[in-house]
Image (cartoon, helix red, strand yellow):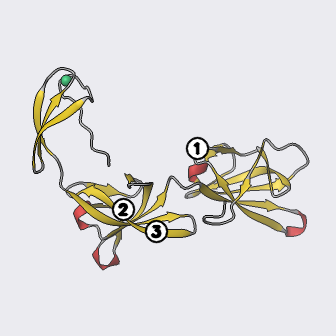
């Protein structure tokens, strides 16, 4: 969490710290000259397991001790941005939300690492060809779209997202788990890049 201040009078973010005593700060707005005081939250280092697809890394994240954290929240690490997927308390208890002071370890997915999704292409005679592909998190997939991967041109029939299956419509790569389709003759609108594993670009 990046610390920044907003002037309560004029909403300017051009604010300077003119006095600091422990967690008590005196601030002055460079825009209108307003001076005010605040007490910043005490920050603690919380262990976090960051997953980058098939690999996990043990790191720590600085968070305000008296605030709450929930699954789905995004936290900033020094070198990463992580979406919380699980919160573990003492006794290995997993919860959806908790006070930061009670957290033993956080689990999350790196948002700086590309999203890796599955592709299943249903070939004749019951054969399925599967791939893992690397996509931009903002990229969209639509049912009916024609794509190419590993020499196969296919049309998307279904998109599996977290918790449900889409038979029409579109979804952002960030929430897609797998796309499924059938081979067709035709021209693909784009080519998907096969994922070769962590650190193998
Ligand atoms: Zn101001």
Q: Which mark is residue 23?
A: none
Extreme residue in the bottom direction: 91
Which element carries disc 3, helix, strand or loop? strand
Question: Quick one: label 1, few (<14), some, or many (20+) residues within 10 Å?
Answer: few
- Who comes first in sequence, dot 1 or dot 2? 2
Question: Quick one: label 3, few (<14), some, or many (20+) residues within 10 Å?
Answer: few
Q: Residue at x 62, y 46 (%)?
A: 171
Extreme residue in the left direction: 21
Q: Residue at x 24, y 61 (%)?
A: 44
Which of discs 1 and 3 lies nearer the camera? The answer is 3
Q: Which residue is mark 2?
A: 96
Q: CA distance from mark 1 to mark 3?
A: 24 Å
Q: Quadrant of the C terminus?
A: bottom right
Left or right: 170, with 107 as reference point: right
Left or right: 104, with 137 as reference point: left
Which of discs 3 and 2 lies nearer the camera? The answer is 3
Asked whether 104 or 126 is in front, the reply is 104
Asked whether 78 or 170 is in front, the reply is 78
The quadrant in which residue 84 appears is bottom left
Q: CA distance from mark 1 to mark 2?
A: 26 Å
Image location (x, y in percent) of residue 110: 49, 57
Image location (x, y in percent) of residue 163: 55, 58
Q: Residue at x 48, y 60 (%)?
A: 109
Classify mark 3 as within 8 Å of ligand 1 or not, answering yes or no.
Answer: no
Which element carries disc 2, helix, strand or loop? loop
Q: Which residue is mark 1?
A: 138
Which element carries disc 1, helix, strand or loop? loop
Q: Is residue 117 above or below residue 136?
A: below
- Who comes first in sequence, dot 3 or dot 2? 3
Q: Which residue is mark 3?
A: 57
Image location (x, y in percent) of residue 152: 85, 55
Asked whether 197 or 93 is in front, the reply is 197
């Amino acid at each position: 969490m990046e610390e920044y201040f907003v002037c309560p009078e004029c909403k300017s973010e051009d604010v300077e710290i003119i006095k600091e005593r422990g967690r008590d700060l005196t601030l002055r707005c460079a825009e209108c000259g307003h001076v005010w005081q605040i007490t910043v939250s005490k920050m603690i280092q919380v262990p976090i397991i960051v997953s980058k697809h098939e690999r996990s890394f043990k790191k720590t994240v600085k968070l305000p001790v008296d605030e709450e954290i929930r699954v789905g929240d995004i936290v900033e690490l020094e070198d990463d941005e992580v979406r919380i997927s699980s919160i573990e308390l003492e006794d290995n208890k997993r919860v959806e939300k908790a006070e930061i002071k009670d957290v033993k370890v956080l689990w999350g997915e790196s948002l700086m690492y590309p999203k890796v999704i599955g592709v299943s292409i249903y070939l004749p005679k019951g054969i399925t060809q599967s791939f893992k592909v690397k996509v931009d998190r903002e990229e969209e997939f639509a049912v009916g779209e024609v794509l190419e991967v590993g020499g196969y041109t296919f049309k998307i029939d279904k998109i599996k997202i977290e918790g449900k299956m889409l038979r029409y419509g579109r979804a952002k790569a960030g929430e897609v788990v797998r796309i499924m389709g059938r081979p067709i003759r035709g021209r693909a609108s784009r080519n998907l890049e096969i994922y070769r594993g962590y650190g193998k670009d």
